């Protein structure tokens, strides 16, 4: 299968971006770029949560945006698990135009439960479901604007999503 544009997997925290991107990169034989581990490696091991706490959310989001722009410029094309914040930036949304963008969506209550499984994600509010509901209300239209494919990950596993993305590439 020959599909040259970069593939970007996005969605709110806990959606499974890393898992889906990892499967797609393996199946397509492409380099994987994943915002969380890539930024931790670049910035002394700091997780997104630690960066937000120590340096502020604006610094974290600028690093996440830079990560996306760099990943989109790489050759050969990558599969990138992009931070949710990248859709906040009009420049990042424009940069996504040539990529195949996969939006992993789910109800905020489902994502809140998933967020509890890992401490690397920033908890901007004590009520994770409320935080994710607010983020989805703001970012949902932006994800929809850039997404080529959208999947409800409360109903599909990472393997099922990846299989559907791969099947969609057959006709591209």
Image (spheres, helix red, strand yellow):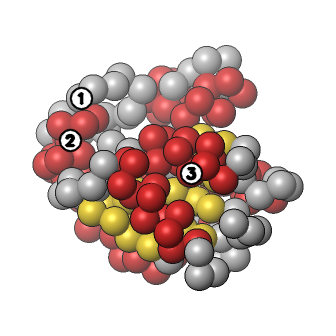
The residue singled out by tag 1 in the image is 116
Q: Which mark is residue 24?
A: 3
In whole angstroms, how far apart are the C-alphas of marks 3 and 2?
Answer: 25 Å
Outermost residue toward the top?
Answer: 44
Residue 146 in the image, given as x and y percentages of width and height: 51, 76
Image vertical order of residue 44 relative to residue 117, above or below: above
- Between 140 and 162, the one lying in front of the other is 162
Q: Residues within 10 Å of mark 2 (few under 14, many from 20)?
A: many
The quadrant in which residue 43 appears is top right
Per the model, the C-alpha gap separating discs 2 and 1 is 7 Å
Quarter holding the C terminus is bottom right
When asked about the image quadrant of residue 116, the answer is: top left
Assess whether mark 1 and mark 2 are in contact (beta carbons under 8 angstroms): yes
Q: Residues within 10 Å of mark 3 (few under 14, many from 20)?
A: many
The answer to whether 148 appears left or right of 169 in the picture is left
Q: Residue at x 74, y 68 (%)?
A: 2
Out of 59 and 4, give the one closest to the viewer.
Answer: 4
Q: Residue at x 77, y 52 (%)?
A: 70
The residues tagged by marks 3 and 1 sit, at their Cα atoms, a distance apart of 25 Å
Residue 121 position within the rendered picture, expressed as x and y whole percent measured from the top left: 39, 33
Q: Secondary structure at mark 3?
A: helix
Question: Is the N terminus in the top left, top right, bottom left or bottom right quadrant?
Answer: bottom right
Q: Position of residue 52 (x, y in %)?
A: 47, 33
């Amino acid at each position: 299968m020959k599909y040259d544009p970069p593939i970007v997997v996005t969605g709110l925290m806990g959606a499974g971006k890393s898992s889906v991107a990892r499967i797609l990169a393996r199946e397509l034989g492409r380099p994987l770029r994943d915002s969380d581990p890539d930024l931790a490696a670049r910035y002394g091991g700091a997780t997104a949560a630690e960066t937000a706490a120590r340096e502020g959310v604006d610094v974290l989001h600028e690093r996440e945006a830079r990560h996306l722009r760099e990943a989109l410029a790489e050759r050969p094309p990558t599969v990138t698990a992009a931070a949710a914040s990248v859709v906040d930036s009009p420049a990042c949304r424009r940069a996504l135009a040539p990529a195949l963008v996969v939006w992993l969506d789910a109800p905020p209550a489902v994502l809140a439960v998933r967020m509890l499984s890992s401490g690397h994600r920033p908890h901007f509010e004590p009520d994770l479901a409320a935080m994710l509901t607010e983020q989805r209300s703001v970012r949902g239209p932006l994800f929809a604007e850039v997404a080529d494919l959208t999947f409800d990950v409360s109903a599909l596993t990472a393997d099922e999503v990846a299989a559907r993305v791969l099947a969609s590439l057959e006709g591209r």
